[in-house]
Structures are given as C-alpha cells and as structure tokens.
Amino acid sequence: MAPAATYPDSPSGVALEATSDAIDNVNVLKAKAAAVVAAEIDDSAYTDSSQFDANKDKGTFRQYEDACDRVKSFYREQHEKQTVAYNLAARIQFHSASRKREEMSIWEAMEKLNTLIDDSDPDTSLSQIQHLLQTAEAMRRDNKPRWMQLTGLIHDLGKLMFFYGAQGQWDVVGDTFPVGCKFDERIIYPETFQGNPDSKDAVFSTKYGIYHPGCGLDNIMLSWGHDEYLYHVVKDQSTLPPEALAMIRYHSFYPWHKEGAYREFMTEKDHEMLKAVKAFNPYDLYSKSDGAPSVEELKPYYLELIDEFFPEKRIKW
C-alpha cells in the first residue's frame, strides 16, 4: 500500500477529497439554483439528456452554506497561486525528460487512488473505485458510447498527481480557468483574485492577455490541476476521441461550460466540444447517490473497455 503524500496545507488524501466534495457540492447547488441551458446540446448518441438522474432530488446533497467557508478559503489560495509563472513551471516539470514517471495500468491507477483517499466522503460511503464505476455505469445504463463510459471511469484519475509533486490541494482540485488573460467575473469568488500578481500585470490583466479572439481553447493555458494533468497523460497514450479528451480537460472549467465565459476564444471545434462537456457534467455531479456497484462483477467488462482504448497496457503517469 503506497504511503499517503503529505503537505503543509493538506496532510492527507482525506482532506483533499473533503475539499473536492465541498467544491462539487457548491457546483451542484449552483446548478440547482440556475437551470442548466440545454439548447446547445443536440440529440446524438452521447448528448441525449441523462436519464439516470431524472427522478433525483438534486437538493438532497449537502447544502451550499455548509460548504461555503471551506470552499471560499480554498479558492482564495488557489486564485492567488495559479499564476502564469506557476503554470509554465508545472508544464515544464510534467514534460521534463528527467521526471520519473511511474508506469501502471488504468486499473492499477484506480487501485492506487484508493490508497490516497479513504472513506471521507459524506455523500457516499463507497470506495473511489466504486464511485468511478458509478459514473461509468450511469452512462452505460443510458446507452452512452463505450468511449464515454471509459471517460466516466477514468475522469478523476488525475488526482493521482497528489503523489507526484503537487504543492497542496489548490493545484489538484477546484474549478479551472485560463491564466494569461483577465480573470473573468464569472469565475467563482472572483474577488479572491486580488492577491494574484497577474491581476495587476500590464498584459495578463487585459481582456485577451497573451491570446487573441478565436485562437481556440487548445491554445489556452488552463489552471493546472487534476483535469489538465490527466488530459496530458492520456491524449498521447489512448485512442479516445476528441470529445472524450474535452470531457476530461474541461469538466471543471465551469466558467466556460456553465457560465458562458471565454466564448470569444472559441473555434467551431470548441462549440462541438462544449456539447460533449455539457453531456458529461450530470454524470460527474450527480452519480454519487446511486447504489454501490460490485467491483468484482464489473471488473471484466471495464478491463476489456480499457484495453479497447489504451493500446499500451501500462501508462506513464
């Protein structure tokens, strides 16, 4: 069993996941308060409205007020530290030839995630593998494509970066946003960016910053965290389609897919990817209240699914 990583502001994976859950809860309750815009989602095999949560009371999750203090404190730290300089350094470190990258299969990565995070989640008593299976199984019941089921299975595996040089909670979890341009008012707790030096930079504080309209989200540097980390891990080591990669990379980019920010940077491709991310979002937020799946019964199906889209059995993390 791998030892838990330790950090001054986050002594264990339990604390990390408690913060992650509070963040999810805020997003659940924000979605409940403002109806999700469905007009942009076309009918197709993967964008049909989710059925698994049709009869759920989405207000049964923990209330916004309970999560508010923890979440605001978290975002203040995240918003002050997610600078252009930090993000460039994080990417340089990730791609460095000298960085030792552990190699393991997708299923082994899921098992390793269980050693990081224990039964700390007040919304569910399930293990992390069971939660990942919940997400995938909800998609499977709704007859989503096999690649989308696999995306649901792996979407949180980027949290393994907690083992690999993360500085705390702030660069692992939380809503994501672009760096290198003005911080949009539609980012959660926008006032907490006042302590970020980029907010006063002559270039980074302007509307477009280092980018230009229509440059495409592929060319935007998003705040470093588990979404961006997993995206960089799987994009060159899998045959997952662009929609799956968008679901992985952008599912925490709430200012964009939920609030409508940063549309000026989008290309035609990005509009298609937005549909995919919106289709994914309900499974990410609401599947935790489903029943406990049987890991051993489902394992053969998902091992086959993993092999279908990951030609190399062992992945470099």
Image (cartoon, grey):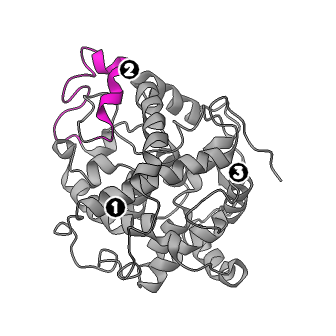
The Cα atoms of the two marked residues, 3 and 2, are separated by: 31 Å
* Circle 1 residues within 10 Å: few <14, some 14–19, many ≥20: many
Where in the figure is residue 277, as x and y percent of width and height?
34, 61
Compare marks 3 and 2 and give the one earlier in the sequence: 3
Q: Which residue is mark 1?
A: 277
At mark 2, the secondary structure is helix
At mark 1, the secondary structure is helix
Q: Amino acid at mark 3?
A: Leu
Q: Which residue is mark 2?
A: 195
Q: Which residue is mark 3?
A: 116
Where in the figure is residue 144, as x and y percent of width and height?
41, 80
The Cα atoms of the two marked residues, 1 and 3, are separated by: 27 Å
Tell me, yes or no, whether the highlighted magenta stretch contains residue 195: yes
Where in the figure is residue 264, as x and y percent of width and height?
16, 42
Instruction: Tell me if 190 is positioned left or right of 6 in this view.
Output: left
- Above-or-below relation of 98 to 251: above
Q: Amino acid at mark 2?
A: Gly
Task: Please state, as top left, top right, bottom left or bottom right, where the N terminus lies in the image.
Answer: bottom right
